[in-house]
Image (spheres, rainbow, N blue to C red):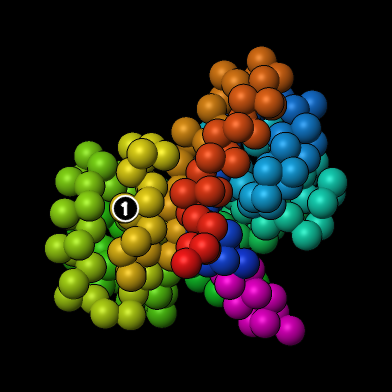
């Protein structure tokens, strides 16, 4: 059962093709944000644990819509991973590769998507049995040319590029066969959420979803 749930979560992520990265410290904004994302066709969010009340935000979203693919990001320790799981996280993300976090997630059948930046780190992730990785921070590392070069020696590895991507670059990243999804905070800027400007979030997400899922040609 647990392995099936893990596979289902990753398949949902691959279908959506976009992962909004959310930094928020106000649980009162959690449900309006979740509803905005769902209404825009993107029932997914990675809640960064950078803020003091991030776990409350995560829990509010998970409780509001159990079908929403909500995960925890910026997970640096095993304890944080455990707290995120109890709060309702369906996947765990991190900026780097922490073997203890990976071990916890494997033991508890929760998907983990660690950050990597170099061939050595990709190789270490492969040794841990991981095939879906976050390439972070992709734009400072060199953007599309870097991703293409670093992915070539690792057939079968999928990447979620994050860090500096904008909607103008999203289509080019998603066109790469090794890319499962794109991620970033540009979809859900903290200032917009805190200001309650959910209409603005909705417009940006709708645009991004159009880029990720262009309508079929009429020809």
Which of the 4 quarters of the picture holds residue 118? bottom left
List the residue tagged with mark 1: 172
24 sits to left or right of 115: right
- Residue drawn at point x = 43 percent, y = 52 percent: 182
Q: Position of residue 178 (x, y in %)?
A: 33, 69
x and y percentages locating residue 132 in the rendered image: 42, 69
Asked if residue 169 lies in the magenta stretch, the reply is no
What secondary structure is marked by label 1? helix
Instruction: Tell me where residue 85 appears, x and y as whole percent.
Output: 69, 57
Q: Is residue 167 above or below residue 132?
A: above
Residue 4 belongs to magenta span: yes
- Left or right side of 138 for 115: right
Regarding residue 142, the answer to whether it shows in the image is: yes
Between 132 and 152, the residue placed more toward the observer is: 152
Q: In this rendering, is residue 159 above or below 94?
A: below
Examine the image and state in which quarter residue 106 appears: bottom right
Apparent side of residue 149 relative to residue 101 in the rendered image (left or right): left
Q: Is residue 52 visible?
A: no
Q: Residues within 10 Å of mark 1 (few under 14, many from 20)?
A: few
Q: Nearer the viewer, residue 166 or 90?
A: 166
Predominant secondary structure, magenta span = helix
Q: Which residues are magenta?
A: 1-11
């Amino acid at each position: 059962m647990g392995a099936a749930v893990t596979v289902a979560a990753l398949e949902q992520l691959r279908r959506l093709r976009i992962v909004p990265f959310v930094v928020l410290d106000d649980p009162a904004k959690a449900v309006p944000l979740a509803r905005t994302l769902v209404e825009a066709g993107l029932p997914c969010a990675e809640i960064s644990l950078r803020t003091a009340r991030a776990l409350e935000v995560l829990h509010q979203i998970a409780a509001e819509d159990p079908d929403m693919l909500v995960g925890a990001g910026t997970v640096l320790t095993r304890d944080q991973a455990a707290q995120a799981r109890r709060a309702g996280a369906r996947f765990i993300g991190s900026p780097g590769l922490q073997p203890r976090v990976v071990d916890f997630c494997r033991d508890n059948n929760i998907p983990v998507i660690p950050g990597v930046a170099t061939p050595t780190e990709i190789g270490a992730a492969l040794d841990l049995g991981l095939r879906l990785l976050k390439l972070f921070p992709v734009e400072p590392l060199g953007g599309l040319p870097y991703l293409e070069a670093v992915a070539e020696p690792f057939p079968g590895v999928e990447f979620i590029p994050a860090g500096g991507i904008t909607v103008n670059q999203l289509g080019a990243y998603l066109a790469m066969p090794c890319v499962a999804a794109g991620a970033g905070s540009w979809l859900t800027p903290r200032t917009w959420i805190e200001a309650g400007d959910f209409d603005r979030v909705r417009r940006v997400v709708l645009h991004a979803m159009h880029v990720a899922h262009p309508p079929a040609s009429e020809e």
